[in-house]
Amino acid sequence: MEHGDAGRGGARPIVVRVPVEPVEAAVEADAVDAVARAGEVVVRGPLFGVAAQGPEDGARWRVVIAVINPCPQLARDSLNSKLWFRAKDEAKDRAERRELLAAVARLESERVDDLEAGGTRYRVVRAEEYAGSGPDGIELPRPTDPEPLVPDWTRGARGPDIDDALLLDPDEPVPPTRALEQLALRGLRYSGARYPEDVLADSRRALDSHPDVLLLPPTFTVVEQTGPRNWEPVSGPHVSAHEARKSMDFTLTWAWPRMRGLIPVDADMGADARSRVADAVAAGAPEAELAEYAGAADALRVGRVNRLEFQGTAYQIARTRRLLRWGPDGPEGPRPSDSNSQEPTRIHLALDEDGRVVPEEHPEDDPEGLPGDLPGD
């Protein structure tokens, strides 16, 4: 990636808001320190979600599908499902339901990125995922990043969702460090021979078509070190560093023991390294290999642990960020060169105009059309 000419194509002015509250001032000071520690930018690639704009939103858009999907079609499929359930459970009348189901039908057969239904405009949006990097490697969570006062390690417990109720407002005043980051990243684009020409061309074109930059809230991902300066993700993005630690705890105690044959795949869902070790100790036959997994997971629970070494590999909680480009018509959608992992498809059963599910007909359910019967027999 490289930086082009910032401010091309009539970019909006950035309104700077000086922090006055103590907590916000601490976050701002933390951001300044982070630049000194990890001032380089490492770009991973695009992520996709869905934003919506109603008549009351003006120039603003609301994120309704979190911007965390690795390909545009996954975001379209999520929108498909969202509109289907809205038609089933929330439509006020048959006319609104027909409009919503027409949008669902398009999403089942087309790669549509911008559509209107039920008085709301929906758009598949594209963000660039990146992270800070410096002499000490990829950026870790900052001291002022939100953390629960009392960490909940219960497996089924969930915190807030990523991008929950997030409002995208290009005119919202931002603190100084975010303003500087947005200005610095306005000209960010793909470069280098390893990118196909269509990817490079789309990236250059985006600087003019969507010259502004909005920064989405940070996410947190477990990564493993595969080289001196190389890190690969072990998990998807999480809303907080604690949720990322919980995912690593689950990986160590539940997923990897099954994947590596230490716990049978068909074992009880509640069985994990901790419970198996406790059972073995109670039976007087200590389980050394699983104890290593349980011990590593227990180490995550001692304070705010952001780095862990296990079986010769270093794992970290990386603070990942997302950059969304913005143009005269709002947030950037997928580019022609963005790849899709699958084709559009039907996800749900059909609904009638009253929101009732229409059962599918199968030949074996038709007493007049049994297999092997011929007309006139």
Image (cartoon, grey):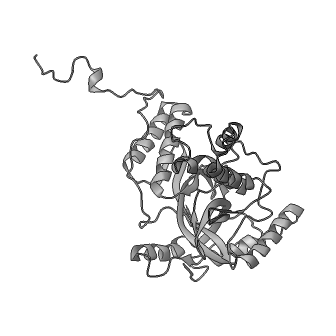
Dividing the image into 4 quarters, which one contains the N terminus?
Answer: bottom right
Q: Can I make out residue 13 in this image? A: no
Question: x and y percent of residue 114 in the render?
Answer: 48, 54
Picture quarter containing residue 283?
A: top right
Residue 202 located left or right of residue 39:
left
> Residue placed at 69% from the left, 80% from the top?
135
> Residue placed at 72% from the left, 54% from the top?
242
- Count the labels in the image: 0
Position of 94 relative to 108 (above/below):
above
Question: x and y percent of residue 206 in the render?
Answer: 51, 72
Question: x and y percent of residue 159 in the render?
Answer: 70, 46
Residue 1 located left or right of residue 374:
right
Return the residue nearer the eye: 239 or 316.
316
Residue 210 located left or right of residue 215:
left
> Residue placed at 55% from the left, 31% from the top?
89
Question: x and y percent of residue 174 in the render?
Answer: 75, 67
Position of 342 relative to 372 (above/below):
below
Position of 120 relative to 369 (above/below):
below
Dividing the image into 4 quarters, which one contains the C terminus?
Answer: top left
Q: Can I make out residue 64 in this image? A: yes
> Residue placed at 45% from the left, 36% from the top?
98
